[in-house]
Image: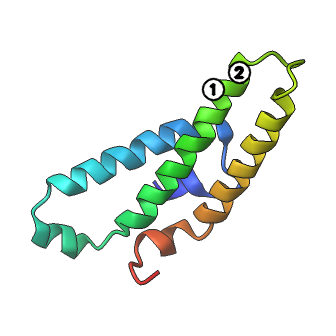
């Protein structure tokens, strides 16, 4: 999973990455607590990252449905780029953030 969030992040793969994170989070919930604690993955960070990707994806889908000439289209494109910057910032130093719960 670590290679999925190496810079630069490929937009066309973001939604698949989100699904992978969600599967990991669900799998972790199914583990016994003692094993979950032993694995020591920063679940809050991963949940935040997948949430940000979900917001980006919602904007991506919406902008694909709105005609280019519509007044709000440019605003959607700007919001999408803003959200992508948030994701890139959040995904920087991915390994350190995933495996360090002290953030």
Residue 87 in the image: x percent, y percent?
63, 55
Using the image, determine if residue 8 lies above or below residue 36.
Answer: above
Closest to the observer, 57 or 31: 57
Are discs 2 and 1 less than 8 Å apart at CB? yes
Closest to the observer, 57 or 75: 75
Q: Furthest-front residue in view?
A: 71
- Seen at 51% across and 56% down, the residue is 49
- Seen at 49% across and 69% down, the residue is 95
Q: How is the image coloured?
A: rainbow
Query: What SS does tag 1 mark?
Result: helix
Query: What SS does tag 2 mark?
Result: helix
Which quadrant of the figure has residue 60? top right
Residue 36 in the image: x percent, y percent?
19, 67
Horizontally, residue 1 falls left or right of residue 7, namely left
Closest to the observer, 2 or 86: 86
Using the image, determine if residue 33 lies above or below residue 50.
Answer: below
Which quadrant of the figure has residue 77? top right
Q: What's the distance in space between the residues labelled 2 and 1, CA to CA?
A: 5 Å
Q: Furthest-bottom residue in view?
A: 102
Residue 8 in the image: x percent, y percent?
71, 53
Dot label at residue 61: 1
Q: Residues within 10 Å of mark 2 (few under 14, many from 20)?
A: few
The residue tagged 2 is 64
- Seen at 66% across and 26% down, the residue is 62
Dot label at residue 5: none
- Seen at 67% across and 58% down, the residue is 86
Using the image, determine if residue 71 lies above or below residue 5.
Answer: above
């Amino acid at each position: 999973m670590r290679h999925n969030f190496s810079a630069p992040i490929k937009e066309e793969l973001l939604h698949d990455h989100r699904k992978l994170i969600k599967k990991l989070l669900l799998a972790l919930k199914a583990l016994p607590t003692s094993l979950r604690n032993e694995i020591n993955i920063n679940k809050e960070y991963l949940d935040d990252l997948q949430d940000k990707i979900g917001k980006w994806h919602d904007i991506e889908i919406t902008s694909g449905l709105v005609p280019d000439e519509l007044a709000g289209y440019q605003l959607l494109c700007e919001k999408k780029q803003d959200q992508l910057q948030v994701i890139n910032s959040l995904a920087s130093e991915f390994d350190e953030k995933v495996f360090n719960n002290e953030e």
